Amino acid sequence: MFPLRLAGLRFAPDGRTVLAGLDLELSGEGISVVLGPNGAGKTLLLRLLAGLLPAHGGSIFWGNSARPDGRLAMVFQQPMLLRLSVLTNVEFALRPQALSPAERKTRTMEVLERVGLAHRVRDCARLLSGGERQRLALARAWAMRPRLLLLDEPTASLDPTATDAVERIIREIRTEGAKVLMTTHNLGQATRLADDIIFLAEGRVQEHEPAQRFFAHPQSPAARAFMQGELPWRIAFAH
Amino acid sequence: METGNSGQFNPAINLRFGPQPNASPGGILATPGGSPTIGVAKPESMTSTLLEALSLLGSFDHRLLDIVLLSLQVSLSALAIGTLVGLPIGAWLAVAEFRGRGALIVVLNALMGLPSVVVGVIVYLALSRSGPFGSYGLLFSPAAMITAQSVLVVPLIAAVTRQIVEDAWREYAPEFSLIGLTRSQSVLLLLADCRFSLTVATLAGLGRAMSEVGAVMIVGGNIDGYTRVMTTAIALETSKGDLALSIALGIVLMSVIVALNVAAHHVRCWAARRYG
């Protein structure tokens, strides 16, 4: 499944280019954080990798294969929760796997314990707070034991305490051997979590560097401007 | 519309309350002169008819009770069949992808407005002695009425279910697809998730079944004590001029429908608080 290689990946719906030949190579360890301005194609990149959208050009190679041979899971910015109990919201994700009902329940309880929701198994998932909802969505993804976990701004609109809890879970998932690829607008979070940074702008990967190096010396003008809080239109205006 | 000598509309005209010995089936009175005329209601007779209707209800008139019980039996049976058939069809159509799906949805939506008399005629032909199911001898029986009402209810429940489940499917499809759920697993989860919204679909089905008159009249025959339900009884008693029984049955019919809607409303409110 790894290294994951993207070669000339294009996405241009209705002739409007969003990704214009994206090249990238990812190893199977650590947390890779995708940064970039709004509309750079961060979420789109995750959706293309998840197979939720077809690319209009280029290729994705999972190791030596065109298809992933390990499990993929994705947590969306707005977690999808059924109007069912917390327990069922995790358990249903295990139904396609060859597990007995008892095994499914054991694994479900195990992850709910680890995300701190074991005491709410009987509650309805839709009544959880924003932070709890995101932890539940992470628990569901974690229970699937993915080889690659895709996270689309998992802490958007969460308070610092909830953000801290989510970040702790992401680190634990990484420690268990899953590769994490996540998007965020929170530079502080990227600093805390990232092993490497992928900076997207204008439909291309502008930089892919180890996190420390990226934050110390961003190479591309777009990344430097982004780090200084410049907006893209201001850069264009300056030029 | 009768307008009287002045040419102005008189709202009292067209109404006649209480037993009318000279009433024709159409409700128009035959006069000694032979030309039909339309009765004029008196306020006191309207009140007495209403009181008579309330008295029938208060005394638990066995005629009225039999009709009400048969109506409930027929309509609830049709609703059960409609739900068992309509829900899976609607949910499947919401998530299925095949050529001609759009056309099938248009047909299903169109069937919601299927005229009940047309269904009555079709079911009549199917169940009549020379029809394909004639050997079962179901014509002019409650079973025939259940069949006709089921035919009316299934498209309605299926179409409303399709819309509700499809809206949920748009929201959940990416996650379900990534998880690798099969279509049948997805359908079951969607039905469970939408269960409270689907009460609207079933209520719509029940409303259609209970208020239906044309089809059950044709296939049931409106036989006293056997296939006479509230709607056919109201139609018959009104034409006979026995407005008290009609009004009593109308009150029961409306009460049942309002009570079911109130119950559904409370279930939805409770569900919103309990399940979000």
Image (tube, coloured by chain):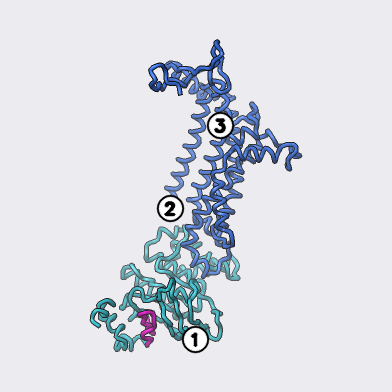
Q: Does the magenta stretch include residue A154?
A: no
Badge number at residue B120: none
Separation (CA) of disc 2 from disc 1: 46 Å
Circles 2, 1 touching at the beta carbon (< 8 Å): no
Task: Identify which residue is drawn at 45% across, 64% down.
Answer: A80
Q: Local crowd at mark 1 within 10 Å, few (<14), some, or many (≥20)?
A: some
Say left or right for B45 vs A227. right
Residue A28 visible in the picture:
no
Callout 1 amino acid: Pro
Q: Name the residue under label 1.
A: A3
Q: Do labels 2 and 1 share a chain?
A: no
* Letter of the chain shown cyan in the rendering: A
Q: Distance between the residues labelled 1 and 3?
A: 72 Å
The span picked out in magenta is: A194-209
Kindly indicate whether the residue at mark 2 contacts the one at mark 3 (C-beta within 8 angstroms): no
Q: Colour of chain B?
A: blue
Q: Mark 2 lies on which chain?
A: B
Chain letter for mark 1:
A
Mark 3 / mark 2, whichever is N-terminal: 3
Using the image as rendered, state which of residue B194 and residue B211 is in the foreground: B211
Q: Name the residue furthest left.
A: A238
Instruction: Pick the residue in front: B268 or B78.
Output: B78
- The residue lying at 31 percent from left, 70 percent from top is A160
Which residue has dot 2 on it? B274
Across and down, in percent, residue A91 comes to 52, 65
